Image (cartoon, rainbow, N blue to C red):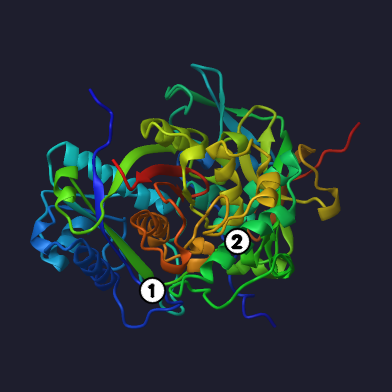
Amino acid sequence: MSSLQNISLPGPTITPVSKPFWDSVAAGKLSIQQCNSCQEWVFYPREHCPHCLSDDLTWKEASGSGSLKTWSVIHRAGHPAWQDRTPYVVGIVELEEGPSLLTHLLVKEEDLAYKMKVKVSFEVIENHTLPFFTKEETQ
Amino acid sequence: MSNRLQGAIIGIGELKPVRYSEGKTTLGLIAEATRLAIQDAGISKEEIDGLLVGPQVGETPQHVPATVSEYLGINPTMSNTVDLGGATGPGMIWRAAAAIQAGMCETVVCVLANKNEKGEALRSPNRNPIREFDVPFGASGANTSYALLKRQHMEKHGSTQEEFAEIAYWARKNAQLNPNAIFYGKPLEVKDILQSPVISDPLHLLEIVMPVAGGAAVVVTSEEKAKKSNKKPVYLKGAGEKITHRAVSQAPDIDALPFSYSIPHALKQAETYIEDIDLLSLYDCYTSVVATTLESTGLCKPGEFGEFVKNHSFGHDGDYPLNTHGGQLGFGQADLAGGMSHVVEAVVQLRGDGGNRQIPNAKQALVTGNGATLSETTALVLGGER
């Protein structure tokens, strides 16, 4: 038996500012902020727009689609609780709306491709829901 | 107003890296590196009136300059914490010169050190936003962040594992001429690097620095005082710095990382060209950092470092001497002090003190520092002549 089995996977450390994001994720939606002043989309959640510093931000549902900028197949996890799940894939997704986020990819290693289209897939990991991404099937 | 930087390095002190320290404090290692540096400069500690230190030094999370001053028994008229990750060392050098030019002090000790005890956590814990938006997805630590940038380079430019491995090969080869290097006596072939375990694909174990205990201190003073020094002064001729992001998910495109600003700025300020640089002392926590840095120097175009490393040689007797002390990949990384090792080696070479690894005609060196994930970048041009 692994000595790591009792270590919990670290969940999100939610703040009052980010709570609407995590609430939307728990409800199966990907909501991010948009600036009412310059119209740019913003991620991660903040009190100020990094483009124009306006504090007038609105939560809106994003499309949940994006493209894969880069990825890594992790063999030695940086956090010990993840080691039992190796190898697994993390990557950076550029959302259609513009911002990029780091995520976990449910994509086979041989299917990973630069700029491939991906879409959000909500997964329950231990007690929390996280926005993972999968390959977007072409219609 | 003239933007010519004025300042000279007259003293260096570097501790021989060890894998683990035992019974040492970071404050003690800082004092030891400082003692060596002022001894090298031939000055007394009463002459130190400026102090630059790193953040969260071991036992001292706050009031770091005051705690270090007290420990050293000095009373600086200028002190500060420089917090630029691996760029902290080079970032200190131009700040020291600027403080001297501003009339706040004349002789500044820039010092970084790190203890590394077995079983001790190496880094401070992740905090938001990285803790909240990266860690829950299984991404913790620098290995994964640098793997992501390396993968982007490979996919965008078609660079290969062999090309990256060449960088680790040269670092290890150069370390064979430096008895202080952690990997002295342990040469590697490219195939050894490629066959080492994959940690965070596409990064192999032997493309990643070894954390060690150690420290380094550098004494920066005015040009007037440097002229009276018994050591050949090494002059600060130019500097450049740029910061773009913290989390790797927020990094600009691989070809627009901040070295593409800071290196040209340093060269321009020094009124020199990359072709007139004799030593490349480039921050190398990972192979992929050197690749991106080389592409930002103008020696090769974005995406073309692979051709460049295949066609040149990087030893002390090569056409592009690079990290002649072994780089951090060969020398070891004593946390933030690892970045200072690139400054120290440039001084050694520009003084002509390189011994069996001395490069011929060493007149100018380009030194770089890099913190977080190619986020905080500093470049310096150092010269043996003003």
Which residue type does callout 2 highlight?
Trp
Residue annotated with mark 2: B170
State which quadrant residue A115 falls in: top right
Mark 1 Cα within 10 Å, few/some/many (few <14, many 20+)? Answer: some
Viewer-proximal residue among A94 and B118:
B118
Q: Position of residue B280 (x, y in %)?
A: 49, 49
Residue annotated with mark 1: B16
**Left or right: A123 in relation to B17:** right
Tell how many labels: 2
Viewer-proximal residue among A114 and A122:
A114
Which residue type does callout 1 highlight?
Lys
Q: Nearer the viewer, mark 2 or mark 1?
A: 2
Q: Pointer 2 indicates a residue of which chain?
A: B
Q: Pointer 1 indicates a residue of which chain?
A: B
Viewer-proximal residue among B217 and B169:
B169
**Left or right: B10 in relation to A92:** left
Vertical placement of residue B227 versus A38, above or below: below
Vertical placement of residue A48 versus B292, above or below: above
> Does the image show residue B140?
no
The local secondary structure at tag 2 comes to helix
Q: In the image, what residue occupies the spot 72% across and 34% down? A: A66
Distance in Å between CA atoms under marks 2 and 1? 21 Å
Viewer-proximal residue among A94 and A59:
A94
Q: In the image, what residue occupies the spot 66% across and 58% down? A: B166
Q: Position of residue A77 (x, y in %)?
A: 63, 65
Vertical placement of residue B234 versus A65, above or below: below
Q: In the image, what residue occupies the spot 61% across and 68% down? A: A81
The local secondary structure at tag 1 comes to loop
Mark 2 Cα within 10 Å, few/some/many (few <14, many 20+)? Answer: many
Placement of the C terminus of chain B among the 4 image quadrants:
top left
Placement of the N terminus of chain B among the 4 image quadrants:
top left
Q: Position of residue A95 (x, y in %)?
A: 67, 33
